[in-house]
Image: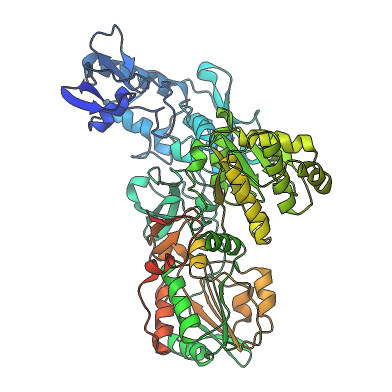
Amino acid sequence: MVNITIDGKLIEVPEGTTVLGAARLGGIEIPTLCDHPQLTPYGGCRLCLVEIEGARTLQPSCTMPANNNMVVHTDTAKVREARKFVLTLIFSERNHFCMYCQVTGGDCELQNAAYREGMTNWPLQPNWQSNVVDASHPYFILENNRCILCRRCVRACGELVGNFTLGFEERGAKSFLVADLGTPLGQSTCVSCGACLDVCPTGALIDRWSAYRGLETQTEKHQTICVGCSIGCGIDVLTRDNNLVRIEGNWDAPINGGVLCKVGKFQPMAEDRQRLETPLVRKDGVLKAATWEEALAAAVKHLKPGKDGVAALASTRLPAEALYAFKQIFSGKLQSDMVTSTEEGQPTAVTASIAAELGKPFEGKLDALDSADAFLAIGVNLVDNHEVAGFFIKRALPNGAKLVVIDPAENPMDVLADKVLKSKADEQDVILALSAAVVKLGLAKTDSAIRPEILNSLAAKTGVTVEDYQAAAQVLASAEKPVIIYGKGITTKSTKALKALVVLARLTGATTISAKGGANSLAAAQYRMDQVFQMNGHQAAFVALADDKPSQRLIQRLEKAPFVVVMASYTSQLTSMADVVLPVTTWTEQEGHYLSLDGHLQKATAALTAPEEIFTSEAVLNTIATRLGVTLAMDWKDQLFERVAPVSIVEG
């Protein structure tokens, strides 16, 4: 530990802490513009200059390490003069018409810094050089007239996301932000994660949805969980007057550390489906508005007990509490033999089977990606799905980490990989060949029954050369902390492919991670709602869809169902063919728990109030249970542990 005195206050901090970090730990504010807690200190803006006893000149606190017995002053006349001079130069370089900017009045860090120094005008006449506004991107706008060259956006794009889309052209005051080599943002390699927006200290990067809809200081902030996939990213939902204003990454969230993808940040804003506002009951072949009493009575009337009574499906976007209530009603009271999720266990059934066979978890936590020095991505597309996990891999590659991709189809991660293996053969054979290559190279970290001589025959069978297998094996097995991440390309196959992957992980000392599916994919599996859906003479079908989108596969399977009840938030082809429709809340209007792909049990909170007469899925299921004479148990959390999970389950 290091003892440092700042403005007369003695502060003890860990060795390696910067002066700025020490000040923050001590509750002392030092203004800064280029610094951000999630980014590597840059020392570009010079606003955080402080006076250090014994130093000849002022020093940037964001890059200066705190030394034992160091004495620092943050508010001397010399420091204040330097800050005002820095701000004066920044204002003079661009066209900062604050009164016309969307972040003026409390949201702009530049404006706030100026007010703290007592500045109410421009000491130097601005340069008045007009910069072109880039409005080509569907989600945000680049306004170089308001840019202060802090490079936070550039660093976030590279350090947090690993995309390296943003950069600067020209030099000095003429520098301006560009995408790629001057490509319009909307046509660039931008992945629409919004990290640049969340770190921008001014109005240089403007969110299209929330622009000019009021200040962040005037909104309500709700910390909750993204339900776009099974990663479980922490988010801040900003609302005003019960309207969704913006979604930001929660920088303190343990899983994603503030990083989001477009599914979590922007797509909820672009929701254009028609909301269901009243229950519907089919009368004389036509869906008509009904009261809740009429709709519930019509639904319950057709929910008959017995194996062929009702087939039931629930979306994995539902909270664990609702999933467990659903399971109790249809598996318990109604004794249905077809109670599953809309995923039908595709991303989880095989992993659950292996966990049961092993009698213990065999997968690791997602944070293994942060410290890994080699990755094997097999049967998974981490650009189109679970993109934040892809960001974790991409940002590690410039630091020396290696990547192997195994996918029979073209994979967006192929261009980043050190080795790509393409084969239309059975995945089990490809994995077995890779294991044989590890053994043949003498890199196996455990004993194995795999014979290295089978490599030649497997190479011929799979159409991949021995040299390619050995090159991939060298990358994975020579690493100190390798990670194997896999998806539906493995889990939709037989257990043999996954068993072979588990063996490969043991040989290489790798951590395995499964991408799973929807937000509560793992919870649904733990409740044994993971079988393939079939209508085998069932007299009714009950679908708890909530705000999910029905697949064409599901719609086709329900077309000939004698009677269909749908709990949904939006109209769809499925609700149009239903006999009873029960309107329920969306993800922003409900609370409940979600089990992430690596076993973190987290609570989501409501950010918006639902329209009148619209209830949560759990509340509607509780009402149905009451009408059926079912007393629901509240041990939903305990039941998550009843089945051996593929990954250890922890709270938080």
The answer to whether 168 is drawn above or below residue 406 in the figure is: above
Side of 327 where 427 appears, left or right: right
Q: Quadrant of residue 376?
A: top right
Q: Residue at position x 73%, y 41% from top?
A: 452
**Quarter holding the N terminus?**
top left
- Residue 112 picture location, percent across and down: 32, 33
Q: Is residue 139 visible?
A: no
Residue 276 falls left or right of residue 504: left
Q: Residue furthest left?
A: 8
Q: Picture coordinates of residue 108 (x, y %)?
A: 38, 36
Q: Position of residue 91 (x, y in %)?
A: 41, 24
Using the rendered view, name the quadrant where residue 402 is placed.
top right
The image quadrant of residue 539 is bottom right
Which of 414/220 is in front?
414
Viewer-closest of 307 and 158: 307
| Camera-side residue of 566 and 390 | 390
At x 63% / y 58%, what residue is drawn?
491
| Relative to 348, residue 63 above or below | above
Question: How many numbered marks, from 0 up?
Answer: 0
Q: Residue at x 53, y 71 (%)?
A: 529
Q: How is the image coloured?
A: rainbow
Left or right: 435, with 306 as reference point = right
Instruction: Between residue 37 and residue 393, name the one nearer to us.
Output: 393
Whether residue 50 sits left or right of residue 584 in the image: it is left
The answer to whether residue 250 of the structure is visible from this angle is: yes
- Residue 448 place in picture, x, y as percent: 63, 45
